[in-house]
Structure formats: C-alpha cells, structure tokens
Amino acid sequence: MTSTPPPQPDGKGKQRAKGPIPLKDGQVDRVVFYDTTIQLGTEEELENTLMLEIMKEILWELCHMSRIQEVLWVFPMSGEVVGPFMISKILNCDLGLMAPDLVERNRYLVALGHLMSSWKGCLDSITRASSGPLVTQVRRLEEACAVLYCQSFFDNFGCAPVIPCRLPSHSLARSQPVTFVDSVSSMRPPSS
C-alpha cells in the first residue's frame, strides 16, 4: 500500500519565484510609507527594503485603520464628514444608537457590539446579538452595551462617560440642520 504525503499549506514546499512580483496593471513599482520607499521589484529587493520595524509599523497602521472603520460603523455619518470623526452639520433628527426605528437602532447596536467584542469582560449577549424578537433584542443589547461601556470607561479614565442621548424637541423641530460652525458661534457671547 502506498501512502501519499499530506497536502502542504500554501507556500510550504514550493520554490519561491525569482522574477518580478506581479503588479496590477504594471503601474506601481514602489510604495512610500511615511519616509520609507519600498521597492516592488523582485522578492529579494522587497525583502531587503522591508525591515522588521517597517513591517511592524505597516501592520499597526492597517490595524489602526480597520479599527477606525469599526468605530465609524457605530455612528451614522450623514452629509459632509471632515476627518474621520468631525461632521460639518448637526442633523435635526435622532439617528444611529438613538434612532426611534428599532431596525436602524439595532444595526448600530450590533456594530457597537462588534467593536466591543475584544474588550475585557464583553459578554456573549453582546457579541452574538441577533436572536429573539427585535424589541427584546434591542433593549437587552442596549443595556448590556451601556453597562460594559460605562464600566470600561470608568475603569480606564476614572470618571463616568458622556453617553448618547436623544435630541431635545427644539432641535428636532428645526427645518434645517445646524452647521457645526453655527452651533459653536451661537454659544459665544455677543461681541461689544
């Protein structure tokens, strides 16, 4: 009886290509990462350029960028967004975590639960929030997320967090959203 060797994982037991690394449409031959230029010629040239420290920085940057995207999924961004977390207008409706519509609110709660899944003390009820009647699910998920968020914030910063709240009725009654600049300038005392 002859036995066949077990299949090798990708990259194992194969010879490395010595030619140029294939590029999409052949248009890119180098990448600049901050002050380092990374040549995309052969694998040997790439290995000579990619020092361990640069690889760590690139991986940290990619992780950081994906984490920012996870944070952005928790908040409804409408209109023009200036930078990742600065909006240009304060909308005159309750959206996202404060939305009166349970389907919309649940979507943002599930995104918050996904973001919190790596936090110390995160419960299964947060990470696996998708079963049960919507009203019950939203209420339980809101409660579990609020408890974990408030406790985690206190543990890390030593004070209570500012939690999301619904807009006051006079804000909801506006016909047009207030721009961020207008909201800040309305808080300043009049100049004499």
Image: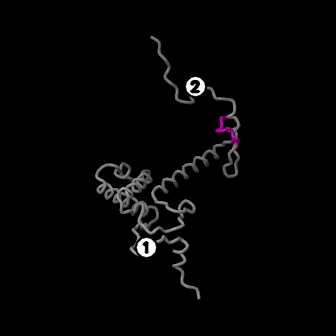
Residue type at mark 2?
Gly
**Tag 1–tag 2 contact (CB < 8 Å):** no
- Residue 154 x, y percent position in the rendering: 42, 64
The answer to whether 59 is drawn above or below residue 177 in the figure is: above
Q: Horizontally, is 192 left or right of 115 in the view?
A: right
Residue 128: percent from the left, percent from the top?
Answer: 36, 48
Tell me the quarter of the image containing the N terminus.
top left
Disc on res. 171: 1
In terms of image quadrants, where is residue 55?
Answer: top right
Which comes sooner in the sequence, label 1 or label 2?
Answer: 2
* Image mark for residue 13: 2
How packed is label 1: few (under 14 Cα within 10 Å), some, or many (20 or more)? some
Can see residue 163?
no
Q: What residue appears at the point 33 percent right and 60 percent down from the top-left corner?
A: 143
Looking at the image, how many numbered discs can be counted on the residues? 2
Q: Amino acid at mark 1?
A: Ser
**Segment colored magenta:** 21-29
Numbered disc 1: secondary structure: helix
Q: Going 60% across and 46% down the picture, which residue do you hit?
A: 56
The crowding category of the residue bearing disc 2, from other C-alpha atoms within 10 Å (few below 14, some 14 to 19, many at least 20), is: few
Residue at 50% over, 24% down: 7
